[in-house]
Amino acid sequence: MQTSTATHIRARLLAALNHDLRAPLARIATNASSGWADLGAMEHEARRQLEWLSDLQECARFELQAPELAEAPAYLHALMRHVTHEGDRLPALAVLDARRLEQVLSRIREHAGGRLALRARSSAGQVALAFQAGQPEGPWRDVTASLADERILPGVMVAAHLVRAMGGRLQQSGDSLRFAIRVPLAEEADAIPPTPHFDWPEPFGAGHAVLLLEPHQPMQDYLSEILESAEFDVQYEPGDRDPSLILCADESVWDIWPREEAPPVLLHTLLPPARPGDFIEVMYKPAPAAVLLSALRRRLQIRL
């Protein structure tokens, strides 16, 4: 029986390698030799194949040992930026492995090829998160995520292993996928922003002052490093020099500046504002360095 199972798995792996890896690699090679290669498209295709191989490798590892999660307070609105949800129902932070949950959501979107929706419900210090992508085509069944399955889909299988480690079950109906998990709520005081990762920008902020109103010290340090990398003059309270822009964490900014007199105000926030139209742009914490710098350059109309 074990020999038969091993032979079955080997056959499925060879079929998957031929269909999902060999054919795309052959297409990349053909495009490269044509002399009319789209380098961006080739890079995207190559990265997809590397991702496929990485997922397959993780599938094999997770069959032997369950994934280990690195749980920490995570900013939910930034994490759910590609997910459809009711913003006023989603809390600010929860304790989970943000990198692994983002990986799960990415693999589900890629497989279902449609809208990924979230329903959130908070109670008793926890939040229940229920995700679904695609329209069901029959009864739901659990994704077993075994290499012995009839069809090997490394991305879906990795997602199933990770969801199981989070205390949920990934289920499938046709190409539609869904799962639900329950995680503890968290406070921003316990959150640590990531270390900014970016290519050192041109000093386009020289000569521009930005008033930074961020009460959470680790987040203030994170934003300061990004702003100073572009040589902005960072102010932490109103001074003699009027700022070119205000970067604030909440709507209390209007207690300092009357709306009609304020310079452009960019909101970098935990939760959706009551009046988003009061701001030139709304971003959710922690905005990636490249995204924040791009917004500042665009909003201040700075040309490089």
Image: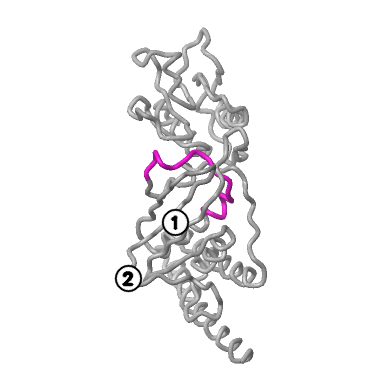
Residue toward you, 68 or 261: 68
Mark 1 surroundings within 10 Å by alpha-carbon count, few (fewer than 14), some (14 through 19), many (20 or more): few
- Residue 9, position as x, y percentages in the image: 56, 83
**Position of residue 221 in the picture relative to residue 23 (left or right):** right
Amino acid found under the numbered disc labelled 1: Gly
Q: CA distance from mark 1 to mark 2?
A: 35 Å
Residue carrying label 1 = 40
Mark 2 surroundings within 10 Å by alpha-carbon count, few (fewer than 14), some (14 through 19), many (20 or more): few
Q: Which residues are magenta?
A: 86-102
Amino acid found under the numbered disc labelled 2: Glu
Is residue 72 found inside the magenta-colored segment of the image? Answer: no
Residue carrying label 2 = 137
Looking at the rendered image, the disc whose residue lies closer to the viewer, 1 or 2, is: 2
Rendered residue at 56%/63% (across/down)? 164
Rendered residue at 51%/19% (across/down)? 211
- Residue 135, position as x, y percentages in the image: 32, 64
